[in-house]
Amino acid sequence: MSTEIDTNRVYLFDTTLRDGAQTQGVDFSANDKAVIARMLDDLGVDYVEGGWPGANPTDDEFFRSPPRLSRAMFTAFGMTRRPGRSVENDPGLAAILDVDAPAVCMVGKTWDFHVTVALEAELSENIDMIAESVVHAKARKDEVMFDCEHFFDGYKADPDYALECARAAYDNGARWVVLCDTNGGTLPDEVDRIVREVSAHVPGSHLGIHAHNDTENAVANSLAAVRAGVRQVQGTINGLGERCGNANMMSVIPSLMLKMGMETGMSTDQLGQITPVSRALYELLNLSPHRHQAWVGEAAFAHKGGLHVSAVAKDPKTYEHIEPHLVGNKRHIVVSDQAGRSNILARLEEAGIEAAPDDPKIHRLVDDVKNREHDGYAYDGAEASFELLARRLLDNVPAYFEMDSFRVDIERRYNARGQLLTVSQAIAKITVGKDHYMEAGEGNGPVEALDNAMRKALLRVYPALADMRLTDFKVRILTPQAGTAAVTRVMVESSDGTGQRWSTVGISPNIVDASFEALKDAIYYKLLKGGVEAAAA
């Protein structure tokens, strides 16, 4: 990677494999890390931080066989030497320098309070630790970076000392001196002011920003720092990270390129991959994507009100700040009880359903949607169920199967070891074409048991269902005043091996019946979109 600096060029440093792994509930395997690293390399980031060699068995395994990246610089993370040790006699420093990574990013204290209290070291010794560690690493690696931990807090407490720490790294050969808002408590105006003051001592061409999101300002702070002169931004996919997360690169990157006119080394085609990358990480972590996430969320370019849809049809810029395809996303017309004819027609066009605007069936469909939502359906979050509803009225939906009857039993008992168990069993009688099936299934709950029983029967005739799975299940009580007779709405999200996701809805006073309705729509939608023909009757 060239170290020549273009003043309009911002370098992207992704820390998902380390900072992202600190997210509560996230646990990367070494293989996961390799997959994500290659994904980031294809996306076009400049640096991929692999983790901290010597910190845990997963990182050790990952660095023993690191991925081969085509353009991104693979980087190891670690600490400067410890107090009281030489750089040649510090196992922690040796661990990060001995691995097969051309770059290293070392973190060190820059807040005088931390030096004296946490490290229990003299302020002058900390300066020596930074300088000597950078010199030692520079002799072993192509690039050396220094993360100034808690820099903004340190600068506000003692600007001279914080600057002395930063200069110790820069003067001894650090390619990047990264200013860290480690507790996420700094605001954009403070970042702007401090970065401008620091850049009088360390050139912005060698400064980076590493922002945490504890005040929901990590992206804003990163952009403010770039505006003030830094030329490296660190962050994670989808803003993963400890506590409230890190700067979200899925927002930072398009903001830099499309709003600020900065160059990042990413092509327009690569920028169009940030939505797929965002969703691929959610899929790898078995998490539901954040629908309302800026830029890449499914609802980021969704329009629900009829007036909005009419305006968007005439000029998308009315309610959209960019063309969705620039970031790999797409416009989405939501159907709900607020929908007018324009919403319905736009959503039908998205689904590939031909319908004339003056077709009387459109008016019936609008009324049907509004009446059904009044009863409790919610089609703005269940697009697959809406498409099936529309096709049944305007087009045609094959009769894939009929549920003749089903029964679900729940048994709560103690096993031979005295452990309390709750087991759900379901029996489903299904007609598929001219054939009749009866299958039983078990599950952790009644819905899973019913789903398993249905799959056993349907997979015999429709093997295309083999890669379909339920990824989310939501229940809402619509009439809590009715007590145990309350109407329940169930939303089911499904996905398949292609990475496609779709949502369906069912309502009933009985939660299992509502779940069946949503499950049936999910299966019908999968078969319909796959072009599967119904079994002959």
Image (spheres, rainbow, N blue to C red):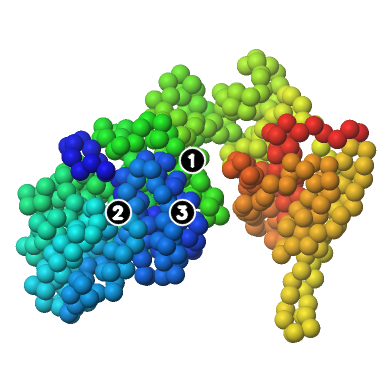
**SS at badge 2:** loop
Give the number of the disc on residue 276: 1
For label 1, the crowd category at 10 Å Cα-Cα, with few meaning under 14, some 14 to 19 and many 20 or more, is some
Q: Are marks 3 and 1 in contact (CB under 8 Å)?
A: no
**SS at badge 3:** helix
Query: Looking at the image, which is closer to me, 97 or 203?
Result: 97
Residue tagged 2: 102
Q: Is residue 276 left or right of residue 392?
A: left
Residue 193 appears in the figure: no
Q: Quadrant of residue 141?
A: bottom left
The residue at 63%/24% (across/down) is 352
The residue at 77%/26% (across/down) is 396
Residue 496 coordinates in the image, percent (x, y): 64, 44
Q: Quadrant of residue 23?
A: bottom left
- On screen, residue 234 above or below 304: below
Give the number of the disc on residue 2: none
Q: Kindly report the distance in space between the C-alpha atoms of the residues bearing marks 1 and 2.
A: 28 Å
Nearest-to-viewer mark from 2 and 3: 2
Mark 1 or mark 3, which is nearer the start of the sequence?
3
Q: Amino acid at mark 3?
A: Ala
Q: Kindly report the distance in space between the C-alpha atoms of the residues bearing marks 3 and 1.
A: 17 Å
Residue tagged 3: 34
Q: Amino acid at mark 1?
A: Pro
Residue 247 coordinates in the image, percent (x, y): 33, 51
Nearest-to-viewer mark from 3 and 1: 3
Residue 106 coordinates in the image, percent (x, y): 25, 62
